[in-house]
Each structure stands twice: as C-alpha cells, then as structure tokens.
Amino acid sequence: MNNRLKVLRAENDLTQAQLAEALGVSRQTINAIEKGKFDPSLPLAFKAARLFKLPIESIFQDQ
C-alpha cells in the first residue's frame, strides 16, 4: 500500500517516535509503514487520518 505518512510527518515536524506515540504504536511500526513493508490496520489508518485531519484516502492509497 502506498502512503504519504513520511511526508505528512515531516510537514508536521514529527519524529517517527512522536508519531508512534500519538498513534499508540512502536517507532518500528511507523518505519515499516513508511517503507511500505507493513500495511496499517483499519483502526490505525483512521487514527492517522484523524491526527492529520485528512481523509484516509489522501494518506493511504491501494496500489
């Protein structure tokens, strides 16, 4: 799954650790999502969308 998580994180001056804490996951999970090695669960995708105040589709795109 393609995503804009890294770009959004950088635009909001967040480290991977800070984003992980805000979403309730590990930094390694954020790293894996950003690299496309792990697809987030639907609840996690919704949390990210709420955090960035964006629709899920603008953050995560199916390949």
Image (cartoon, rainbow, N blue to C red):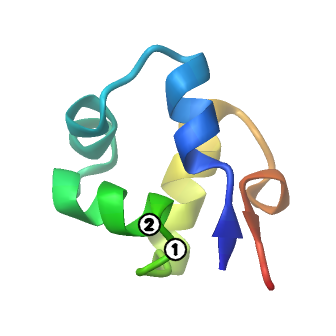
Residue at 49%, 81% in the rendered image? 39
Q: Could you tell me residue 18's position as x and y percent? A: 25, 29
Task: Name the residue rendered at 58%, 60% in the picture.
Answer: 46
| Res 7 → quadrant | top right
Is mark 1 in CB contact (under 8 Å) with mark 2?
Answer: yes
Q: Mark 2: which secondary structure?
A: helix
Task: Please tell me the numbered disc located at residue 36.
Answer: 1
How many residues crowd around disc 1 within 10 Å: few (fewer than 14), some, or many (20 or more)? few
Looking at the rendered structure, the kind of residue marked 1 is Gly
- Amino acid bearing label 2: Ile
Which is more toward the observer, 2 or 48?
A: 2
Question: In this figure, what is the number of numbered marks?
Answer: 2
Residue corresponding to mark 2: 33
Coordinates of residue 19 in the picture (x, y in percent): 34, 37
Q: Quadrant of the N terminus?
A: bottom right
Can you give x and y, in whole percent of width and height, for residue 11 in the image?
61, 19
Viewer-side residue, 53 vs 3: 3
